[in-house]
Amino acid sequence: MSTKPHVRYSFVNLATAVAATSEDTEYPASNLLEPRRPFMPWKSTSLSAQTLTVTLSGNVDLVILVGANFTQASVNGDAITIERNPHNWRYQHGLFIQPATPTLSIVITASQTPVDGDTVYRLGGIWAGMSTIPPMNPRYELEPSTLVPSEDLQPSHKGWMQRLNMGDPVAAFRTRRVARADRIAPALADQLQQWTEIDRQAMAVDRFAFFFNSGDPTQAYIMRYSQPTITWTRPRRRIAESQVDMEEVVA
């Protein structure tokens, strides 16, 4: 079991307003405040340098950019390269910054070739919040999935089949968490209590940010638990375990 947790949760998006150098009137910068809707993005009006100035309601140390069609940018002056996520196949980026308030500055480098061949820049959303550190990392038996919404149409004679794609891919994960638990009073001032508090916050909100922070900055997501019940078992007197399923929020 790891003693140095690196994954991060963030339960409140503290971005309250966004001003952009330019915006398509049908895809305004205000769309960036809803990172759970990456397919309702902000779009610029040209490929010149763009600055996104994000107003914050408090200090933040975690920033996640979802659904970008560009690869070169900077966040508060730190250059980043945005790459393709291996599970949802979109361009995403998560990074830590020094706690900053009241604004966040994201500058998109001029004259890039958008990865989707468009003639303008696009970004699906911005999450800016304070991160929460769990008591330990999830176990390494992580099971990632790529859910591709589709429906197969086929007549009863099965002479042909037409597959209809009903949406863009969604990332999902199944993993197990481990916690040290008090032998006499489990979930009282122990790691199990810390995990149950994370579960409480995750279940209380419509979506939360989840960052693996494992060396791959693309592994940053807007997620929700996809199960209605959290069950903890105690295979040993001082150890508790729980399986959790998470699914990316895209609408």
Image (tube, helix red, strand yellow):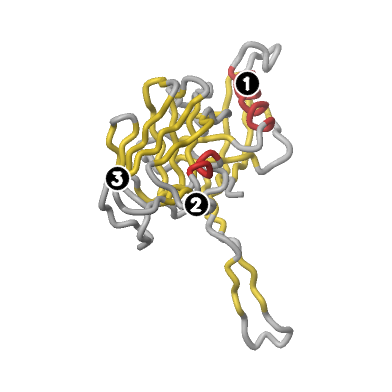
**Is the Cβ of the residue at disc 3 closer than 8 Å to that at disc 1?**
no
Question: Real-space Cα distance between discs 2 and 1?
Answer: 49 Å
Asked whether residue 104 is in view, the answer is: yes
Q: Position of residue 199 (x, y in %)?
A: 64, 28
Badge 1: how crowded within 10 Å, few (<14), some, or many (20+)? many
Report the side of 224 relative to 184 (left or right).
left
For the residue marked with disc 2, what is the amino acid?
Answer: Thr
Q: Callout 2: helix, strand or loop?
A: loop
Can you tell which of label 3 and label 1 is closer to the viewer? 3
Q: Is residue 38 above or below residue 102?
A: below
Which residue matches tag 3?
Answer: 49
What residue did someone put label 1 on? 192
Question: Reading the chain from its start, which is encountered first: label 3 or label 1?
Answer: 3
Q: Is residue 15 left or right of 72 when viewed as pictured? A: right
Q: Is residue 235 above or below residue 156?
A: above
Residue 70 drawn at (x, y percent): 34, 50
- On the question of residue 145 being in view, the answer is no
User: At 50% across and 20% down in the image, what residue appears?
Assistant: 58
Per the model, the C-alpha gap separating discs 3 and 2 is 18 Å
Describe the element under mark 1 as helix, strand or loop: helix
Closest to the observer: 129 or 211? Answer: 129
Query: Which badge, 3 or 2, comes first in the chain's sequence?
Result: 2
Dot 3, how many residues are within 10 Å of its Cα: few (below 14), some (14-19), or many (20+)?
A: some
Q: Nearer the viewer, mark 3 or mark 2?
A: 2
Q: Which label is found at residue 25?
A: 2
Verify CB contact (< 8 Å) between mark 2 and mark 1. Answer: no
